[in-house]
Amino acid sequence: MASLITPRILLIGTADTKADELLFMRHCIEQGGGQALVMDVGVLGQPPFEPDISNTEVAAAADASLAQVAALEDENQAMQRMAQGAAVLVAGLYRQGRIDGLLALGGTMGTDLALDAAAALPLGVPKLVVSTIAYSHLVPAPRIPADLMMVLWSGGLYGLNSLCRSSLAQAAGAIVGACRLARPPKFERPLVGITSLGCSVLSYMKRLKPALEARGYEVAVFHTTGMGGRAFEELAEQGRFAAVFDFSLQELANQLGGSCVTAGASRLTGAARAGVPQIVAPGATDMVDYPAWSVPPARFAARPSHAHNRLIASSIADLAFRQQVAQEIATRLRSAKGASCLLLPSQGVEEWDRAGQPLHDPVGLLAFMEVARAQVHAPTELLELDAHINDPAFTDAALAVFDRWVAAGIVVAGARVPAA
């Protein structure tokens, strides 16, 4: 657990070029009641103060000397090598209980390194990057840790001024406060992961969550709009789940369709690789999302669409694409090292595809079902259901599979909560 009295913050930056900024942030952290441990990731210059972790130590963690890194004579390659060393040291410092959180500073080069360093920390450990490109399209979603905080480094590229002092002080206060109040997950009860969208699209979690909690499980529902799926996959691959109900695979469809609303190429693989028991359904795979303020991927530009709000809209997939998605789901399920079951709700995969709704497409649904039926084989179990994914019958069927796996010892039994 974080040090509530004196949070220990790892402060990362190039001490040769950002000394004033690092010293200012260290002062702010100390003013806020925290303790800063400064890591220098610069390569060429000599810092005007002595960092707690030198750049030679960072290079050594990447199996190189600082001279070897400098000899690369390529700024990009050199900083990638330093990023490798920084990530190794960050992970080690956390394992040793020496830090409670991370604060890093940089422009594009420093941000590139900071993303790797932050990714070395588990979900739930505070991590903040002060960057000249915070929330920019230059920062690709697959590089962003699921719980990363960012603050724009306003007007501070060359030296301190009142604008950048405001940004740096805010970041220092945010990381100290986050570390004081952070509660990293303890995984004291078996955890079940569920993927979904909002209740207006997918609503099965309304029945699943209380039913699983009554069985003694902790339940986490992940919003599959890109970053939520990334967090889900990361935890699944770490083996943190007792089982998963992966019923919203829209991010997989988005990835195949060229949408930016994606959890990356590894969607529907984490549980499979870790051997986590997985019950899967093709929720919302009839849609390809795109930013409502932009345009859909070219392939779907002429397709019917639905604007969910001013941020996100969805185009209905064509028949060939739905067949492609079904094939890809089958392919990924074949790699499962643990128990897997695919539920096929024959009456629809999200609320907007019901009869009379804007994305109703029975021909496309049938095409999806036919490919899935032909391509999903043992050991993955295939269960076709005469129900819509949001119907109680679908939830009942999913719980029946889960209970059968618990009885067989495939899924660890829940920690029964004593009656009040």
Image: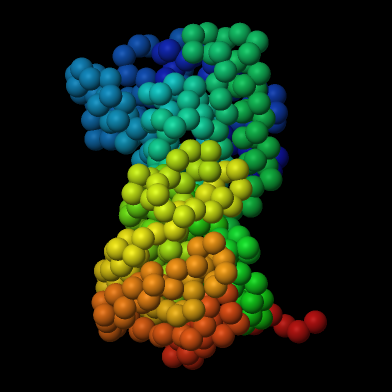
Q: Residue at x 51, y 32 (%)?
A: 135
Q: Residue at x 30, y 72 (%)?
A: 330
> Taking 234 as reference, is 143 above or below it?
above
- Percent position of residue 48, x then y: 46, 10
> Taking 18 as reference, is 53 above or below it?
below
> Taking 330 as reference, is 261 above or below it?
above
- Percent position of residue 43, x then y: 32, 19
Q: Closest to the observer: 385 or 331?
A: 385
- Percent position of residue 175, x then y: 62, 35
Relative placement, left or right, of 257 versus 71 is right
Q: Residue 286: which quarter of the image?
A: bottom left
Marks counted in the figure total 0
Name the image colouring.
Answer: rainbow
Relative placement, left or right, of 354 versus 114 is right
Q: Residue at x 53, y 43 (%)?
A: 292
Relative placement, left or right, of 413 versus 53 is right
Q: Residue 207: which quarter of the image?
A: bottom right
Relative placement, left or right, of 51 versus 320 is right
Q: Closest to the observer: 205 or 179?
A: 205
The answer to whether residue 96 is visible is no
Q: Residue 81: which quarter of the image?
A: top left
**Quadrant where the C terminus lies?**
bottom right
- Percent position of residue 95, x then y: 46, 48
Q: Residue at x 24, y 35 (%)?
A: 63
Q: Closest to the observer: 226 or 250?
A: 250
